[in-house]
Image (tube, rainbow, N blue to C red):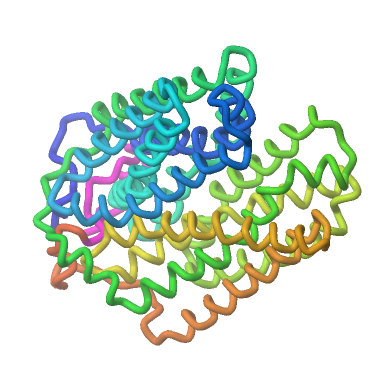
Amino acid sequence: MTISPHATSPRANPPHLAIVLISLAMGGFAIGTTEFASMSLLPFFAADLHVDEPTAGHAISAYALGVVLGAPLIAVLGARFARRTQLLALMAVFALGNALTALAPGFGWMIAARFLSGLPHGAYFGIAALVAASLVPQQRRSQAIGQVMLGLTCATIIGVPLANLIGQAVGWRASFGLVSVLALLTVLLCALFAPRDRAGRSDPLRELAALGSGRVWITLAIGAIGFGGMFAVYTYLATTLIEVTKVSATTIPFFLAIFGVGATLGNLFVPRFADRALMPTAGVILLFAAVALLLFPLAAPNPWLLAADVFAIGASVSLGAILQTRLMDVAGDAQALAAALNHSAFNTANALGPFLGGLAIRAGLGWTSTGPVGAVLALLGLLIWAVARRDAGSAPVSINAKSPAAASDDAPARSAPHYRNRSAAAHEDPVA
């Protein structure tokens, strides 16, 4: 049996797979909490730091810029380090960035702290996805990645409302302090349970080789365009609820939680289908998202119909785990860079969707116009998906012990020891 360079070192009693995935997902929970809660805390830190709300929004942009720039840069520079080491370092920097945010004496310092907080975001999710995929058989990779992403979606249900409540009761600084504590908890969990691996023998040039692959870029384009529709609606959902649905502001957290439940269940169940048919599942999700977004203006006046539609839009978040798996298949030796770039692509969508939705609103098309705008983006993503499907090399890469990729330090570590229950292990052969 061939052992991947990123496999765990032998241990008498390795932790159960679920414990490892929960440890990785805790980092996603911390990241999701700070990313989404900072939007709801904007009025509080704007008033405290004596800037208007549009100016305070630059703190949100600074975080996103950190994600977009940090993901590929850290992936390349960290290519020679063990994945476990990278996880610990990235979460430590994330904890520091949020602690500095909580202590920021002025708005300029907060901008710098938010940029620092965003730098580890994409790289952490990319490395965590690779670690999760290395611990299960190839046919369960999407499920494992989806379970790691559950931390991010659960943050929209639990972490964001909790941070907002603390921000209102104690102060916005306490909310970012909470995120810093969650990040330090992730460092502890990963130190205890993340699989130990040897430092990679990769180099920056080999990681950068991913940028020369057309299949990598087209996969990133699916996310950067197709995912923009969800962000277009989510960004203006609160105002739509007040202006169109005519509900009180106190019910807004309920609808945001409904979105989070949809995203969580989507990440829990959709990857099961993706493990059987990866790219077809991605196409179905894009089409499903386009329909849900088109129905948004019709559902908006009725709170119950809107809740159902918001749930459906949230379920489309599962596209992230599917595209992450696709990138692992087409990136060759540049696994870490491709995995991190996936989150740069989604943050591009996070900028594109709200921008185009805002243009439609300012043009007088109404708050619900974000739905059709989002549907167009989802359909454009589906068009890019169709081009990717026509690619003759779209089938998943088969890695075996005789292939060069199998010997590569940064190839998907599918031969790592399987963290399964003993009864299951008794009936399954190890993946070589």
Which quarter of the figure has residue 407? bottom left
Q: Position of residue 230 (x, y in %)?
A: 64, 56
Q: Is residue 281 above or below residue 395?
A: above
- Magenta segment's dominant SS is loop
Q: Position of residue 219 (x, y in %)?
A: 44, 70
Q: Position of residue 271 (x, y in %)?
A: 51, 56
Which quarter of the figure has residue 354? bottom right
Horizontally, is 340 left or right of 284 in the view? left
Q: Is residue 108 visible?
A: yes
Instruction: Locate the C terminus by quadrant.
Output: bottom left
Between residues 330 and 234, which one lies in front from this camera angle? 234
Residue 413 forms part of the magenta stretch: yes
Which quarter of the figure has residue 1? bottom left
Magenta region? 411-432
Between residues 4 and 323, which one lies in front from this camera angle? 323
Q: Residue at point 20% right, 59% down? A: 410
Residue sitting at the far top: 170
Q: Position of residue 295 (x, y in %)?
A: 81, 61
Residue 231 forms part of the magenta stretch: no
Q: Is residue 372 above or below residue 122?
A: below
Q: Residue at point 40% right, 54% down? A: 68
Q: Is residue 292 visible?
A: no
Q: Is residue 236 above or below residue 103?
A: below
Horizontally, is 142 left or right of 95 in the view? right
Residue sitting at the far left: 201
Q: Residue at point 40% right, 31% down? A: 109
Horizontally, is 254 left or right of 37 in the view? right
Q: Residue at point 12% right, 60% down? A: 203
Total numbered circles: 0
